[in-house]
Amino acid sequence: MAPKTAISPTRAADYPEWYQQVIRAADLAENSPVRGCMVIKPWGYQLWENVQRALDDMFKATGHQNAYFPLFIPMSYLEKEAEHVEGFAKECAVVTHHRLEPDPEGGLRPAGKLEEPLIVRPTSETIIGATYAKWVQSYRDLPILVNQWANVVRWEMRTRMFLRTAEFLWQEGHTVHATAEEAIAETEQMVDVYRDFAQDWMAMPVIVGSKTPKERFPGAVETLSIEAMMQDRKALQAGTSHFLGQNFAKAQEIKFQSETGDIEYAWTTSWGVSTRLIGALIMTHSDDDGLVLPPRLAPSHVVIQPIYKDDSRAEVMEYVNSLRDEIAAQTYNGAPIRVIIDDRDIRGGEKKWYHVKRGVPIRLEVGPKDIAKNSVFCGIRNQPKSFGISREELVQTISTKLETLQNELFAAALKLREDNTVSIKSEAEFRDFFATKDEDGIHGGFANCYFADEDALDPLLKELKVTIRCVPREGNDKPGTCFFTGRPAEKMAVFAKAY
């Protein structure tokens, strides 16, 4: 008989539905009345706030400042950069009217037609570029290093909470430089910031690499990305950094007078991550009992659950309150430990599973018997069994316990990726890897393959629903033989099914 789990179905039974049920059980978000959009609930938004704070500090440490730009973009701005607008055209939401009036049936109808349609921001290169054209006159005005935290709209037809919604939250950095070398260095620096955040904060191992021409951001000269493996062995693009060359500068007339007095076009970059990172967290670490959170990003590190009857309530709460204060006086990852008390009038078992499903890293239970021994009962989210521990030892080791959990989550995710990454040298091997399911009903993983011609691969990749994730930056300095054509190939790429 299979053990009972808090989430049904399990990952093995139905991974996509398991994902939706984890979101529901952890109270992260829910579908909104607007098709394709979501309501991010307090626990989910606290998680996003922790992502924001960590990244924002990293951006500012690299010299960037925050600003804000309009939600609406004149359609003519997108038309100036043909490749860019082609890449986003099908996803654009368009505003054509600016007021409502009563209609004869008693409802409302659009009245004032706009002279020019406005696009609801799918990304901001064009509107920010037009602004930068006014800001930049001389080489002395450069570099511009700006980020904005915002929402964007992409009219997705098939949506999934956090991974792909019509509206989502993100940050987008946009920088301007005097030389190509400076812009390329910026592009590389920011993908490294994303790598460090993913691995150090999310406990999610990633591969850094370049996108192939067909997979690049529309209008970019080069796109760098971080790619992660989810537990169903599909890839998730978790962040991108784009070297835009002079394409957008020429479209938006971002020019400056150089030190020699010449008028030159600037070099620009853009880079971003979104609430998709929450989906990445869920699919990297969570289990069949619910959400599992890396402590560095968890909204609460510790929850204390008092257990008492009416005659012992005062004694237990006095102990619990003092324990909370003692734990909160400890630090983890350079800040006070975040600890809450759950004193709701519900059964202890129900309360325990509530916090298990929400992914709280450490759960503490305290009752009269624990107080008599000056101890607590401790549960750590990735361990199957709880245990008793003295209060003194708990307080002394709680920071270490949190860091151990953080490291164990990273190690488990890295092992999953390593165990499911193969090198493939022939089309037959490639087909077998991506078309044959194992005993868990999963096919594939990451395939490292040399390739010589991206166009030639299109029919095979479309047939198997596989994409080229990236050309890895590390360990990719030896030429090889294309697995498909047999021709000499300069680089190896990571192939995978993907979200």
Image (cartoon, grey):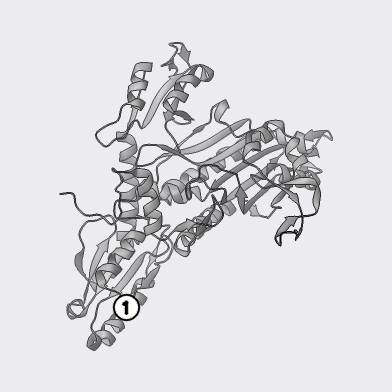
Task: Compare residues 131 and 84 and report the one nearer the observer.
Answer: 84
Q: Residue at x 33, y 31 (%)?
A: 443
Instruction: Check disc 1 and report its element: helix, strand or loop.
Output: loop
Task: Compare residues 186 and 114 and report the one nearer the observer.
Answer: 114
Q: Is residue 202 left or right of residue 176?
A: left
Q: Is residue 123 visible?
A: yes
Judging by the rendered image, the residue that carries numbered circle 1 is 345
Circle 1 residues within 10 Å: few <14, some 14–19, many ≥20: few
The image quadrant of residue 271 is top right
Task: Compare residues 135 and 383 and report the one nearer the observer.
Answer: 383
The image quadrant of residue 323 is bottom left
Establish if 46 lies above or below 134.
below
Q: Residue at x 46, y 51 (%)?
A: 278
Task: Compare residues 96 and 51 and report the one nearer the observer.
Answer: 96
Q: In the rendering, at what x and y percent does residue 434 appear?
A: 36, 27
Residue at the front extreme of this rendering: 105
Q: In the rendering, at what x and y percent does residue 342 appear?
A: 34, 73
Q: In the rendering, at what x and y percent does residue 62 appear?
A: 58, 49
Establish if 191 lies above or below 86.
below
Q: Is residue 252 left or right of residue 330?
A: right
Q: Is residue 76 left or right of residue 487?
A: right
Q: Residue flagged by tag 1: what amino acid is it? A: Asp
Q: Quadrant of the C terminus?
A: top left
Q: Is residue 253 left or right of residue 12?
A: right
Establish if 197 lies above or below 491.
below
Q: Residue at x 18, y 49 (%)?
A: 2
